[in-house]
Amino acid sequence: MKKEIIKRFLSSIILIPFSVFLIIKGSIYFNIFIIIFFLISIYEWHKMTKEKNYKIFGIFFLIFSFYTIYILRNKFEDGHIIILFVTLICVSTDIGGYIFGKILKGPRLTGISPKKTYSGSIGSYFLSLVFINIFLNNKYINFGIDHSINIYILTFLISTISQIGDLTISYFKRLSNLKDTGKIIPGHGGLLDRIDGMIFAFPFIYIINLTNFFNYFK
């Protein structure tokens, strides 16, 4: 267990800064980045579902999900801010769930994933709100987003969608009798294991932007 935590930590401190750099850099660098992620995700989904009759629906969903990431970054004003905002919430949701779940344990959230607990879910909400609050109140590292109740509501909603995405991929892994979607990231498993929340959160935020539901970047 200790070795896995070390692997998880080392992978994160390499992957996260690299991803942030490419998100900010944008242009062809970011596009190549998400194309690679898309191809790996499709491959892992293909291996996981094999001859399952729902495979094609997952492929179409991944196409749509990565399409929304491309559009949000390249076609929306301040696209890099949107991508960073959603990524921060999903990552902090994942970290909060992992840490609080490991430390506090408690009753299971659902039978779909035995490791998911109520304490982990609460920790996911808590840490995502803490992280966003830090960024909103630090003039050196904030996203330039207006400090309003809508941001906290949106953070809560994105964290919820991220957790649903996590449970959804866990459900399909359970159907396929798999622990991880792959082994590409040391300590984490497959790529889908790490971006399961994001591939659901980005389509959600894309629709929110299209409908101008919160108008939170104005």
Image (tube, rainbow, N blue to C red):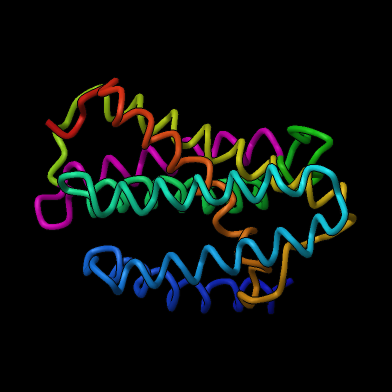
Seen in the picture, residue 111 relative to 100 is either above or below; the reply is: above
Q: Is residue 32 above or below residue 124?
A: below
Q: Taking 193 as reference, is 129 left or right?
A: left
Q: Quadrant of the C terminus?
A: top left
Depicted 148 relative to depicted 120: above or below: above
Q: Quadrant of residue 171?
A: top right
Residue 3 picture quarter: bottom right
63 or 163, which is in the foreground? 63
Relative depth, front residue between 124 and 182: 182
Residue at horizontal 36%, vertical 75%?
Answer: 18
Q: What percent of the width, then of the height, locates residue 214?
A: 26, 22
The magenta region covers: 117-143
Predominant secondary structure in magenta? helix
Q: Is residue 123 magenta?
A: yes
Residue, x 27% and y 30% (percent of image)? 151
Location of residue 67 in the rendering, given as x and y in whole percent from the top left corner:
43, 50
For residue 61: magenta?
A: no
Q: Position of residue 199 (x, y in %)?
A: 52, 48
Quadrant occupied by the N terminus: bottom right
Q: Is residue 92 left or right of residue 30?
A: right
Q: Nearer the viewer, residue 105 or 194?
A: 194
- x, y percent for residue 27: 23, 68
Residue depicted at 70% across the width and 74% down the height = 183
